[in-house]
Image: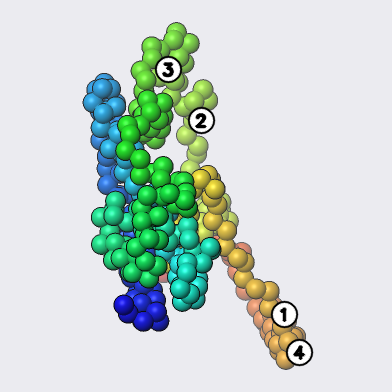
């Protein structure tokens, strides 16, 4: 039998490998489940309800397996966080549920790293401890782990709930129902008036040059920032998440900056007054765009 310290080090390494592997498998199963849900929506749209009810059981089983792997991942993280308690000869009560749940569930998964961690735990605590965990004679295995590993067909209510959720997600009319006269009338009104019941305004006259000169350009004009932030995805805790960014910190100018600003402001005022005095006799167009006729007159005067 290997010394306790070296055995604990091996258990720690296998737990880290198990966590990374469990996360990878969960991501893969989630991606496959999305494709299967899209296929279920197509079957519902085609009216193949019986085929959809049979195939949706695979999605339910995949979701249950994913939830089981998530629970085992949490137990592995718990053992890593309390790795100091693994040094004792007897299993600590704070680790008993996690250790026995891993020993009980690991052989029923396809995660080799988790199975190797299970073998090391069995070697650490002995065959009698492992036998208690496998048979769950003392009910120390987590109830949710035992429930996820039960082999039984899903309830009809659960199957219907899954199909209803898939239909709502992909916009499929299921279960199909006959349209009432009120709904048909509303659809006819929408077809007759596609603008949502509001009259379409007539085309406005084009803006003049003076109005264009006073117009403010849109803020999104020009090159966009290469940095973009994706909005958070919805979850069961937060159905409609909103992205909130912290504002820029308020910076107060120091004494030097305040003095520099005053000096710059005084210099700019003197320059403006001088410019106004020297250029008062010049004809300046007040920020307006000249018309075509006015430009033609100017060119004619220059030719003279």
Position above or below: 216 against 8: above
Residue under pointer 1 = 252
For mark 1, give the secondary structure: loop
Mark drawn on residue 201: 2
C-alpha distance separating marks 4 and 3: 69 Å
C-alpha distance separating marks 3 and 1: 60 Å
Q: Is residue 19 visible?
A: yes
Question: Badge 1: few (under 14), some or many (20 or more) residues near its Cα, within 10 Å?
Answer: few
Tag in front: 2 or 4: 4
- At x 30%, y 34%, the residue is 57
Rendered location of residue 277, percent (x, y): 71, 80
Give the mark, 2 or 3, whose residue is nearer the N terminus: 3
Which residue is at the far front? 128
Mark drawn on residue 255: 4
Q: Quadrant of residue 258?
A: bottom right
Residue under pointer 3 = 187
Nearer-the-camera pick, 170 or 256:
170
Q: Are marks 1 and 4 in contact (CB under 8 Å)?
A: no
C-alpha distance separating marks 2 and 3: 23 Å
C-alpha distance separating marks 1 and 2: 50 Å
Which residue is at the far bottom? 256
Q: Are marks 4 and 3 in contact (CB under 8 Å)?
A: no
Give the mark, 3 or 1, whose residue is nearer the N terminus: 3
Which of the colour schemes (rainbow, by chain, secondary structure, one colour) is used?
A: rainbow
Tag in front: 2 or 3: 3
Split into 4 quadrants, where in the image is the N terminus?
bottom left
């Amino acid at each position: 039998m290997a010394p306790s310290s070296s055995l604990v080090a091996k258990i720690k390494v296998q737990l880290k490998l198990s966590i990374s592997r469990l996360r990878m498998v969960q991501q893969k199963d989630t991606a496959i489940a999305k494709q299967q849900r899209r296929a279920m929506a197509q079957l519902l749209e085609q009216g193949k309800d019986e085929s959809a009810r049979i195939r949706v059981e695979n999605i339910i089983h995949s979701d249950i397996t994913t939830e089981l792997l998530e629970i085992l991942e949490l137990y592995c993280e718990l053992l890593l966080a309390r790795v100091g308690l693994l040094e004792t000869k007897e299993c600590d009560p704070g680790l008993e549920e996690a250790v026995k749940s891993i020993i009980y569930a690991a052989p029923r998964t396809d995660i080799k790293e988790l199975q190797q961690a299970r073998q090391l735990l069995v070697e650490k605590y002995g065959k009698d401890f492992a036998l208690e965990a496998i048979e769950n004679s003392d009910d120390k295995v987590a109830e949710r782990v035992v429930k996820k590993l039960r082999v039984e067909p899903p309830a009809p209510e659960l199957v219907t709930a899954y199909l209803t959720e898939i239909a709502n997600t992909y916009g499929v009319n299921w279960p199909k129902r006959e349209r009432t006269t009120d709904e048909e009338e509303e659809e006819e009104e929408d077809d007759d008036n596609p603008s949502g019941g509001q009259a379409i305004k007539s085309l406005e006259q084009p803006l003049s040059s003076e109005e264009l000169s006073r117009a403010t350009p849109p803020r999104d004009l020009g090159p966009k920032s290469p940095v973009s932030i994706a909005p958070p995805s919805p979850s069961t805790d937060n159905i409609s998440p909103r992205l909130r960014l912290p504002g820029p910190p308020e910076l107060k100018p120091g004494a030097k900056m305040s003095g520099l600003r005053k000096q710059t402001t005084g210099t700019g005022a003197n320059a403006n007054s001088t410019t106004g005095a020297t250029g008062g006799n010049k004809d300046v167009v007040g920020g307006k765009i000249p018309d075509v006729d006015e430009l033609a007159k100017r060119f004619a005067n220059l030719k003279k």
